Amino acid sequence: MGVTDERILRVHDLVRFRADDDARVPPWVTRDGDTVWGVVRRPPATAPDATALGLRGANRSERVPLQVKLRDVVEVVPPEDLAGRTLGSSVNPVLAEALSILATASSETLGGLAWGPTGSAGFEPRGFGLCVRRATST
């Protein structure tokens, strides 16, 4: 039974998948042993047993789309699980402060609605050690 048997993958979910000998994974992608983290993309996968992911590096030019078989998915982290997470020192300090303020304010003002950082902001709280947001990021 794979991790995706219990839940449906959604756009912006962070996904760790087995990629031990996957030549499609560029050398600039940070590996976690024999696994790699990606983010679920909007375009659907073309195969019924796969998901469309995006891989990121530290630079804007380091992005690649990829389809991964669902059986290779080993962990899924939805953006809601990142809200309120304490960020490490390798993370953009402005983003860390903003997410901390949002986490505090949202618990008081959103009345229990779920939220979480997505896109490049989602990679930093996960602890990838990637500071992918810049002052010019939108």
Image: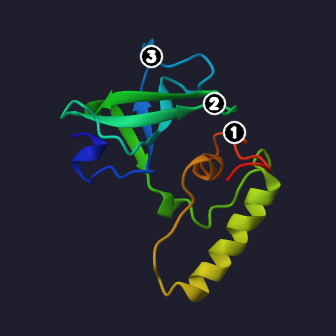
Q: Which residue is mark 1?
A: 130
| Distance CA(mark 2)–CA(mark 1) | 7 Å
| Distance CA(mark 2)–CA(mark 3) | 14 Å
| Residue drawn where x is 63% and y is 73% of the image | 103
| Neighbours of disc 3 within 10 Å: few (<14), some (14-19), many (20+) | few
Q: Residue 117: x, y in percent? A: 57, 59
Q: In the picture, residue 98 is in which quadrant?
A: bottom right
> Does the residue at mark 2 contact the one at mark 3 (Cβ under 8 Å)?
no
Disc tally is 3
User: What amino acid is at disc 1?
Assistant: Leu
| Neighbours of disc 2 within 10 Å: few (<14), some (14-19), many (20+) | some
Which label's residue is closer to the chain start, 2 or 1? Answer: 2
Can you say whether 51 is above or below 137 in the image? above
Q: In the picture, residue 60 is in which quadrant?
A: top right
> Does the residue at mark 2 contact the one at mark 1 (Cβ under 8 Å)?
yes
Q: Secondary structure at mark 1?
A: loop
Q: Nearer the viewer, mark 2 or mark 1?
A: 2
Can you say whether 120 is above or below 62 in the image? below
Can you say whether 6 is above or below 55 in the image? below
| Residue drawn where x is 62% and y is 62% of the image | 85
Q: Secondary structure at mark 3?
A: loop
| Residue drawn where x is 77% and y is 48% of the image | 136
Of all residues, the one furthest to the left in this rendering is 48
Q: Which residue is mark 2?
A: 57
Q: Which residue is mark 3?
A: 24
User: What amino acid is at disc 2?
Assistant: Gly
Location of the N terminus (image quadrant): top left
Which label's residue is closer to the chain start, 3 or 1? Answer: 3
Q: Residue 66: x, y in percent? A: 41, 27
- Say which of 117 and 129 sits in front: 117
User: What amino acid is at disc 3?
Assistant: Arg
